[in-house]
Image (cartoon, rainbow, N blue to C red):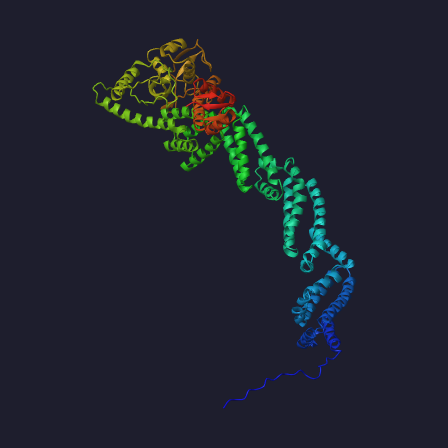
Amino acid sequence: MQNPKRKPFKIEPFKHRVEMDPKYADRTWKLIEHAIHEIYSHNASGLSFEELYRNAYNMVLHKFGDKLYTGLVTTMTKHLKDIALLIEAAQGGLFLEELNRQWADHNKALQMIRDILMYMDRTYVSNFNKTPVNELGLNLWRDHIVKIPKIRDRLLDTLLDLVHRERTGEIINRGLMRNIIKMLMELGASVYQDDFEKPFLDVTADFYRIESQQFIECCDCGDYMKKAERRLNEEIERVSHYLDPKSEVKITNVVEREMIANHMTRLVHMENSGLVSMLVDDKYEDLGRMHSLFRRVTEGLATIRDVMTSHLRETGKQLVTDQERLKDAVDFVQHLLDMKDKYDKIISIAFSNDKTFQNALSSSFEYFINLNTRSPEFISLFVDDKLRKGLKGVSEEDVEVVLDKVMMLFRYLHEKDVFEKYYKQHLAKRLLSGKTVSDDAERSLIVKLKTECGYQFTSKLEGMFTDMKTSRDTMQGFNTLLAASSEHNDGPSLAVQVLTTGSWPTQPGAVCNLPAEILAVCEKFRAYYLNTHTGRRLTWQTNMGTADLKATFGKSRRHELNVSTYQMCILMLFNSADYLSYKEIEQATDIPTADLKRCLQSLACVKGKNVLRKEPMGKDIDEEDMFHFNDSFTSKFFKVKIGTVTAQKESEPEKQETRQKVEEDRKPQIEAAIVRIMKARRVLEHNNIVAEVTKQLQTRFLPNPAVIKKRIESLIEREFLERDKIDRKLYRYLA
């Protein structure tokens, strides 16, 4: 049996309309309005917030949100106007306290009101693009409290006055200041900036403009900077206590401009206390403070750097051109090293190892060291002095430190090849006389020079050490042969260093007549050496040797004299003669005139070393002088070293000769560089050749453009290069 179909049913609306109480909205708003009054009157404890929330909810639900929102604005505005009157009425220091108290009460009231009207905030406000309750409360406070002229002007004046009083040493209520400033910040960035920050920065600029002028008139540079630093720190501290953190950059910029930037030129040039005075007196603390403050302003560090560079260059120029200083090469270089140490320490301690200051220091030293053409010679003499005499009471590490400092000066030299020329001469004398304090120190310096300038720069220097080692092996073989020989007797012994031509700074032709006893043993060595090494040739360099002589004075006083080979030749003449004239000595020895006079001067005119007597007495040697053996010579030492009287620095003719040799040595180096460049480029313009040759050779010397031009012309004559037929400044390489 089938079930009958059910008929669909329809729900009908109520036959009568639901009528809302027409006074519902007014009555409900009155309840909420009363609650707002109670909240502002501090009587909120008796209110039912749940009921108030429900009433506000229902008003929004029943489309009375606009009435609720408008009523809120009207009610809050009325209360804020009343509050404004209370704040205006506050007298003196109570003004800020009243403002702060009312602001705190307003925030509490706003929080309660927002809780009651939460549903309106979520729906009606967002749907109709109204201002949220909390923001509305802040805006109304801004418009009816902070922005009204009587309060706004008074508030600004009070805040600025408190800051001024704090700057002048008074203690203020920072907590109250923090709350008021925070209020301005919460009312919007524009309120804080327009109503406080901009006037605050203007007043600050005026304050520090006046104060800086007062300070600079009565303080020296060091004291002024201490005050400026203190003021800067105070402003930074002020920001941390009660200002917007974003204000820190702005306020520090004002202080930096008024106290530093506007006066920095006058500060660095202050007489007896400015930058130069600080540098001279090593005032690290003041220099560090100046660096710290000046780095904050545009061109601040450049100002310090320029004054330091100018002072350095002037001081250095005076040093390298001071004729008194130039009399002692070692003292001259020591002053350079002391100056370098001084400024290195200043840059390290006071200028935070600022790279730009280090570069300025290097460029200054490079400038004034090269003003003196004898700087390469003097630096080599300094090294010679230290490696001959040693550094008393110092370790090998300290020797390394000194060598590193010398290398720093070496890097500044434009004419490194001139240094090489002198260094080779001085090294040769040290090695041949056995006067070097440490082979390790000697080799260490050569390694440093090789690192700086390359293998070619030091290849001959290393060859000198190789020759010394080979010579020791050769002498060992020769002495063994002599010991085995039946002819060996108690005659003079010989120690020979065989030097490779080209590696050593020998002086061909500087020979003398050796005594017969010495000549005999020399011939034995020549025969031994040439028998061992065929195809070689020996030339005696008597100007570079030394000798130990046993001498008897009076009847029994014996001494061992350490003399040069030339001095030995002179002294041995007195074995067979009591008196000899200068002419007789010159004829017998054939020693060059200049060397002979220096040897005789050292043997007869140096107090405590005068193994000869000169007639007439005097410091200078004349061709009419007579000499005789000084039997009355005494010394408390058995071994007496007699040096040769000679100028530590080269004489002017010697200097010219060395310069000429250097210039001659440079010519093939310049030509080789030109050929290398042209071989790679094939075609090149004149100025570009000069630039590239200079770049290639600057590690050894700075070639003169005029010399480069002459070498180009020489290469054209020898058909390595040719000029372009159209452009005469263009050169072509001929393969």
In the current view of this chain or complex, which residue is farthest to the front? 1
From where the camera sits, is residue 501 visible? yes
Residue in the foreground of this view, choosing between 684 and 376: 684
From where the camera sits, is residue 393 visible? no
Tell me residue 231's x, y (percent).
Answer: 65, 48
Residue under the point 66% across and 71% down: 119
Residue in the foreground of this view, choosing between 4 and 443: 4
Number of numbered discs overlaid on the protein picture: 0
Can you say which quadrant of the picture contains the C terminus? top left
Residue in the foreground of this view, choosing between 632 and 732: 732
Residue 592 vertical position relative to residue 456 in the rendered view, above or below: above
Residue in the foreground of this view, choosing between 160 and 551: 160
Residue 257, by quadrant, is top right
Tell me residue 637's x, y (percent).
Answer: 37, 25
Tell me residue 172's x, y (percent).
Answer: 69, 56
Tell me residue 545's x, y (percent).
Answer: 36, 20
Asked whether, in this view, residue 493 is left or right of residue 392, the answer is left
Residue 118 vertical position relative to residue 453 in the rendered view, above or below: below
In the current view of this chain or complex, which residue is farthest to the bottom? 1
Asked whether, in this view, residue 588 is left or right of residue 731, the answer is left
Residue 152 vertical position relative to residue 507 in the rendered view, above or below: below
